[in-house]
Amino acid sequence: MKALTFQGKGQVKLVDVPKPSIKNSGDVLVRITLGAVCGTDLHVYHGYIPMNPGELLGHEFVGVVEEIGAEVKRFKPGDRVVASFFTSCGQCALCRKGWFNQCVNKATFGMGANAGGLGGAQAEYIVVPLADHSMEPIPAGMSDEQAIFVGDILATGYFGAERAEITPGDSVAVIGAGPVGLMATMCASLFGPARIFVVDMVQSRLETAKDLGGIPINASQGEPVEAIQAQTGGIGADASIECVGLLSAVDTAIRCVRGGGTVSMVGVPSAVIGDFPYMRVWSKALTFRAGYCNVQAYMTILLDLIAAGRLKPDAIISHRMKLDDGEEAYRIFDAREATKIVLRP
Ligand SMILES: [Zn+2]
Ligand SMILES: [Zn+2]
């Protein structure tokens, strides 16, 4: 089968690899019908997340079940499914506490041997281990494009918004209008805020944020914290959702929030260490939350919100490309010429 592989810093390549097959009784073989390129893939591409040359890329996908292991109960061949970007067992102490992203048996797709050695989703087929607990069926009538982001960026946006403790009438600041920031903008509106500011420097992304109900703030044209304070009676936002992962963005997320407010960070950190402004967090008595999404806890909720027309995550897709053009997809996504790219095998 064809698959996109990491080949070294700044290099991806479409190659022919053996079609994967079921090895354990909880595995499901999925024929991928749509994959996506994610900001996290760019962290791999740039060498922030270590991967070995030749390993398969991609962790956002939907597809059709082709074959099931002997103990799989929830799926049968022919079912359309969306998978989380990581697997969880549902049985360990942390899964039983509801923290599936902390599962002791967790592994992540498309991140190579360092993340559990799973396959990649920018390919024609993938094996999903622990399938009963790592995927959900796609409701009848829902398209691949509507369902695909439930397994990662939409869940991440919702997780970020939920942990920002937004209450009706609040002012919220979303830092970053990339795919996750746009999802956070969409999800924040479910909690009833009066206004959602969206901070970025790319005008086209800010236009999309505006279409989703956000108030665009272009950080290249002025100090974003001052702009937010000016529109909140001088006090700042009640909560912020950080969706970039750069220290500068975390700093903006902290500075734009009023005393006693909440900062919810979901951006993938692009540095392992850095100067965290804990004095500011302490002196403003902020609640600071950070972490990547506990996807499995949100998939059915999100599929239902999409089915009901309350969320339209496919609105952010800017490029529909073939898997064959995957190398070009990485180039234009990295150059910020695309908001979100989906790949059809
Ligand atoms: Zn992702
Ligand atoms: Zn577990």
Image (cartoon, rainbow, N blue to C red):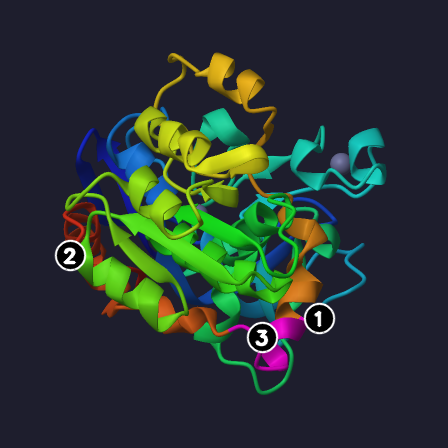
Q: Is residue 331 above or below residue 262?
A: below
Which mark is drawn over residue 306? 3
Find residue 123 and report its horizontal and vertical position in percent. 37, 56
Circle 3 sits in a helix, a strand or a loop, which is it? Answer: helix
Disc 2 C-beta below 8 A from ligand 1: no
Which mark is drawn over residue 337? 2
> What amino acid type should be assigned to the residue bearing mark 2?
Glu
Measured in 3D between alpha carbons, the distance from the residue under mark 1 to the one under mark 3, in whole angstroms, is: 24 Å
What residue appears at the point 60 percent right and 68 percent down from the top-left corner? 81
Q: Quadrant of the C terminus?
A: bottom left
Q: Which residue is mark 1?
A: 76
What residue appears at the point 62 percent right and 49 percent down from the top-left corner? 295
- Closer mark to the observer between disc 2 and disc 1: 2
Instruction: Please tell me which of labels 1 and 3 falls first in the chain.
Output: 1
> What amino acid type should be assigned to the residue bearing mark 1?
Lys
Find residue 208 and report its horizontal and vertical position in percent. 30, 66
Q: Quadrant of the N terminus?
A: bottom left
